[in-house]
Image (cartoon, rainbow, N blue to C red):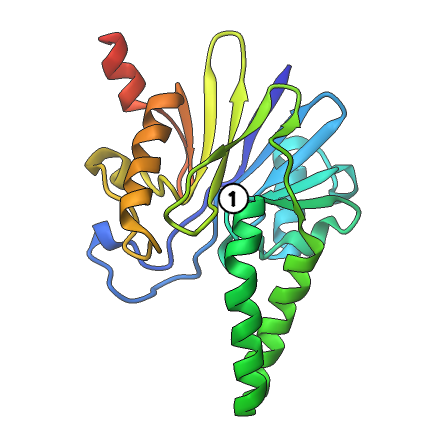
Amino acid sequence: MVDLRIISIGTLSAHPLWGERQPVRTGHATSTLVRSGKRAMIIDPGLPPAVIAARLNERSGLAPRDITHVFLTSFKPDTMRGSSAFENATWWVSAEEREGVGVPLAGGLQKAVRDGDGELARLLEQDVAILRRCQPAPDRLADDVDLFPLPGVTPGCCGVLCAAAQKTTLICGDAVATVEHLASGLVLPSCVDVRKAQESFAEAVEIGDELVLGRDTLVRSPGRVARKGE
């Protein structure tokens, strides 16, 4: 049996569908706890370590030491900011994402060192250390919990599909960002591949009875409702 609950609702630093063009807040991903069997997984710990640890306890009664795995739907500061709260856990990211961001990240670090930009080099070194810590995720994360590739926003953006007897819930990451993006059928303007992102958006809406949005809450899928004629 899969137990899924929202630990923290995320937000965009600038919400384009609210007319925001420049960052007006600190963006962070929606964080979700998924428990199946002996595994307790945090998906996208986007808040700072102390904050995500407090929210975890508030929403589930668990402490960071109780978390067995961390999974990042994409490799961004907004999804991984609180990862260090879970030092005893196994950290996962999709193999495609790990490969897709690894080479540019290493290249950026080398350039920062050549240019003498110490602050940028320090930040990139931190990201490289996190990426090295992240193992390629298996296709099955736990019983009834599987990877669901959603490329486009980033090279290897990957959702998490949780199956239950009566419904299927898809944790979308930024493939479906907010309720406004869901209602309008739009993807984020920062996508690395807009066409793939649009295809992933459509697949997410089709496959899930419920969707955990990347920067919003748990909602019913309008695509599934429309097909059922509800």
Task: For label 1, count other residues whose C-alpha is less than 10 Å away and answer few (under 14), some (14-19) or many (20+).
Answer: many
Instruction: Name the spot of residue 10 as percent of width and height, x first.
Output: 45, 46
Instruction: Name the spot of residue 198 as percent of width and height, x first.
Output: 28, 40
Q: Is residue 60 left or right of residue 27?
A: right
Question: Does residue 34 sit above or below 101 in this rendering?
Answer: above
> Is residue 32 at all visible to an observer of this figure?
yes
The residue where tag 1 is placed is: 73
- Name the residue rendered at 49%, 40% in the picture: 158
Question: Could you say which quadrant of the image residue 124 lies in?
Answer: bottom right
Along the viewing direction, whichever of 52 and 117 lies nearer the viewer: 117
- The quadrant of the image that shows the N terminus is top right
Given the image, on which type of amino acid does mark 1 rest?
Thr
Question: Does residue 225 sit above or below 147 in this rendering?
Answer: above
- Name the residue rendered at 30%, 36% in the picture: 199
Question: Could you say which quadrant of the image residue 139 lies in?
Answer: top right
Question: Does residue 31 sit above or below 109 in this rendering?
Answer: above
Question: Could you say which quadrant of the image residue 205 lies in?
Answer: top left
Instruction: Name the spot of residue 106 as percent of width and height, x first.
Output: 58, 70
Question: Does residue 218 sit above or below 63 in this rendering?
Answer: above
Along the viewing direction, whichever of 53 and 212 lies nearer the viewer: 212
Point out the residue furthest to the bottom here: 116
Q: Is residue 114 left or right of residue 203?
A: right
Helix, strand or loop at mark 1: loop
- Name the residue rendered at 22%, 50% in the picture: 17
Instruction: Name the spot of residue 160 as percent of width and height, x first.
Output: 52, 32
Q: Is residue 222 left or right of residue 5?
A: left
Along the viewing direction, whichever of 75 and 138 lies nearer the viewer: 138
Q: How many numbered markers are drawn?
A: 1
